[in-house]
């Protein structure tokens, strides 16, 4: 008889299911109460209310729910790897490693599939009882929650095979989900203290490197609701692409975990890192993260200021790096006796490398601080978050002022007086983008110095060309949704509004354009006109054509804005409000 290799052991799968009954039983009970039981108790339902509730539950299930449940299931299935006795026991059984892994992995999938399928069928039945067809959203709920569970479960299983310590597994899982944004934040803080002009608002890498953080910041379960005359008539689920990608990534992680398990040393039970070639990564990764994070905290506490100086930051980072290296080595060796020659050599190399990188950033070895784009390569420029302007004169003035800022770097950095923060963003013709952020001196806020860099940047930012583009968009993709005028009336100072026809609104806009171009309306910051009391304001609401973006701009009417005042009088605004 021909012998066959089996990747499935029914006895092992059955034992795993029975052992995990309390866990998947609670998971089943939770969703029974949240979906079918809750649906049956709803009263006075409006059309599609149950469908909306199902998709709201999908957000909870596909983020927090499967995040924690996937970790719990993986820990239950593979916790035996972390105890020496149980690891040796299962390794001695006449069951191939492939069979053990696949059987346990499949039983973990059943922990979610069986309860989810049961809840889906009961939810569909509850919808029938309440008079609404929820079959499609219930099936979407089943598919999406399963795909997201596939990812988080696969990630947890992968983390489970990287370590041999019971406490390290959930820590690695949390690190995998949050390391990217935390490390990015710390790196930008440190770099901001070292690199003149660096903007901390940019992203160093994609958000999807941190799965849960990505799901919380981007609603991947997107649903488009169809409306007719203000009434909902249907819905379309549009979030399949990210959900399918997450599910595929979960399968890839499970395969990687399978490959790690095939070569795993059972003697690694109890080790923080069970994969030998990952130990240097752990050692120097902890050194780097601890050095930057703890070093930044220590430097901030010492200076008690938002301005961090390189002379203080460097020794703090090096000290924290030593602490991180020794802690990582103690965890790897499982002893406090790590003061050996080889470790001193490793630590010395790490400190030298870190010092060289920090010095290179501080003294602009890579030319980041000194770089200013050429005017012929810039398509448009945005000043302090305003709309991009493609006017060649504005671009040339911005570049000239930017070059002066770079030339006076030390004066700007050593300024201890009043300052204004500005962001310059260049949009290049080749599709690239250059962004810089500066804290420019202005002298005194109450009596600013016209020759200061901050004041001159204010003048450029309040140039009529810039203001016209910021308040009155010229893009065909942006439409004006509404115009509203608000003014103070009566002895009690209450606010009233004026309703306008489209023709009246266009007449007001034209008058405001004239005043902005003359420099009598719309100025901000240090150059805001005297006499702006907020008695009369005009609010412009803009929306991008596809509905993905909206923006509002408020202009306070000044006594010098004669064209706007005349247009407001024609609208019937009380004369006392215009005084």
Image (cartoon, rainbow, N blue to C red):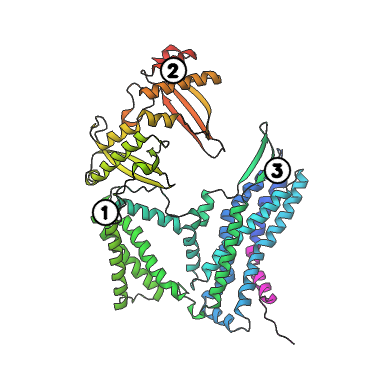
Crowding at label 1, few (<14), some or many (≥20) Cα neighbours within 10 Å? few
CA separation in Å, label 3 and label 1: 58 Å
CA separation in Å, label 2 and label 3: 47 Å
- Asked if labels 1 and 3 touch by Cβ distance under 8 angstroms, the answer is no
Per the image, the residue denoted by label 2 is 492
Residue 41: mark: none
The secondary element bearing badge 1 is classed as: helix
Per the image, the residue denoted by label 3 is 42
Q: Residue 444 in the image: state x and y as whole percent.
A: 24, 33
Residue 12 among those drawn in magenta: yes
Q: Which quadrant of the figure contains the C terminus?
A: top left
Q: Residue 222 in the image: state x and y as whole percent.
A: 60, 47
* Residue 506 in view, yes or no: yes
Foreground disc of the pair 3, 1: 1
Q: Residue furthest bottom?
A: 1
Closest to the observer, 175 or 277: 277
> Would you say 198 lies left or right of 58 here?
left
Foreground disc of the pair 2, 1: 1
**Which residue is at 64% across, 65% downward?**
109
Closest to the observer, 330 or 247: 247
Per the image, the residue denoted by label 1 is 302
CA separation in Å, label 2 and label 1: 51 Å
Dot 2 or dot 3: first in sequence order is 3
> Would you say 286 lies left or right of 504 here?
left
Range drawn in magenta = 1-24
């Amino acid at each position: 008889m021909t012998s066959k290799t089996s990747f499935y052991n029914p006895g092992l799968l059955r034992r795993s299911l029975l052992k995990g009954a309390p866990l998947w039983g609670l998971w089943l009970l939770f969703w029974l109460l949240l979906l079918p039981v809750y649906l049956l108790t709803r009263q006075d339902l409006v059309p599609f209310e149950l469908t909306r509730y199902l998709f709201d539950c999908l957000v909870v299930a596909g983020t927090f729910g499967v995040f924690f449940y996937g970790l719990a299931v993986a820990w239950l299935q593979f916790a035996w790897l972390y105890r020496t006795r149980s690891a040796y026991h299962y390794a001695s059984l006449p069951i191939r490693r492939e069979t053990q892994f696949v059987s346990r992995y499949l039983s973990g999938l059943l922990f979610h599939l069986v309860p989810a399928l049961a809840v889906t069928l009961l939810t569909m039945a509850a919808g029938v009882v309440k008079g609404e067809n929820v079959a499609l959203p219930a099936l979407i709920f089943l598919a999406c929650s399963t795909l997201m569970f596939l990812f988080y479960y696969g990630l947890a299983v992968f983390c489970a095979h990287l370590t041999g310590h019971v406490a390290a597994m959930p820590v690695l899982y949390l690190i995998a989900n949050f390391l990217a944004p935390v490390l990015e934040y710390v790196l930008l803080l440190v770099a901001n203290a070292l690199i003149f002009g660096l903007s901390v608002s940019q992203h160093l890498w994609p958000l999807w490197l941190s799965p849960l953080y990505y799901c919380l910041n981007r609603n991947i379960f997107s649903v488009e609701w169809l409306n007719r005359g203000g009434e909902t008539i249907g819905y379309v689920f549009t979030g399949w692409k990210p959900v399918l990608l997450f599910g595929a990534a979960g399968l890839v992680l499970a395969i990687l975990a399978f490959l790690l398990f095939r070569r795993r040393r059972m003697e690694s039970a109890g080790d923080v890192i069970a994969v030998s070639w990952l130990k240097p990564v752990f050692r120097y990764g902890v050194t780097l993260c601890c050095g930057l994070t703890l070093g930044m905290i220590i430097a901030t506490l010492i200076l008690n200021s938002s301005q961090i100086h390189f002379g203080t930051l460097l020794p703090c980072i090096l000290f924290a790096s030593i602490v991180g290296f020794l802690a990582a080595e103690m965890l790897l060796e499982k002893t406090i006796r790590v003061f050996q020659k080889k470790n001193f050599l490793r630590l010395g190399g790490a400190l030298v490398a870190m010092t060289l990188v920090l010095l290179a950033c501080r003294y602009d070895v890579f030319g980041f601080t000194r770089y200013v784009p050429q005017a012929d390569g810039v398509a448009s420029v945005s000043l302090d978050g305003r709309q991009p302007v493609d006017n060649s004169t504005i671009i040339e003035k911005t570049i000239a002022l930017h070059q002066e800022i770079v030339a006076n770097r030390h004066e700007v950095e050593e300024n201890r007086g009043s300052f204004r923060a500005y962001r310059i963003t260049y949009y290049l013709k080749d599709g690239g983008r250059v962004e810089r952020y500066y804290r420019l001196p202005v002298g005194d806020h109450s009596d600013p110095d016209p020759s200061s860099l901050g004041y001159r940047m204010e003048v450029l930012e309040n140039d009529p060309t810039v203001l016209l583009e910021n308040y009155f968009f010229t893009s065909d993709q942006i439409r004006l949704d509404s115009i509203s005028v608000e003014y103070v009336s009566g002895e009690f100072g209450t606010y009233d509004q004026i309703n306008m026809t489209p023709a009246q609104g266009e007449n007001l806009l034209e008058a405001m354009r004239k005043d902005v171009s003359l420099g009598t309306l719309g100025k901000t910051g240090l150059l805001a006109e005297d006499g702006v009391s907020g008695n009369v304001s005009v609010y412009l609401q803009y929306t991008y054509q596809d509905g993905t973006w909206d923006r509002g701009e408020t202009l306070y009417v000044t006594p010098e804005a004669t064209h706007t005042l005349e247009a407001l009088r024609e609208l019937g605004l009380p004369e006392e409000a215009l005084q």
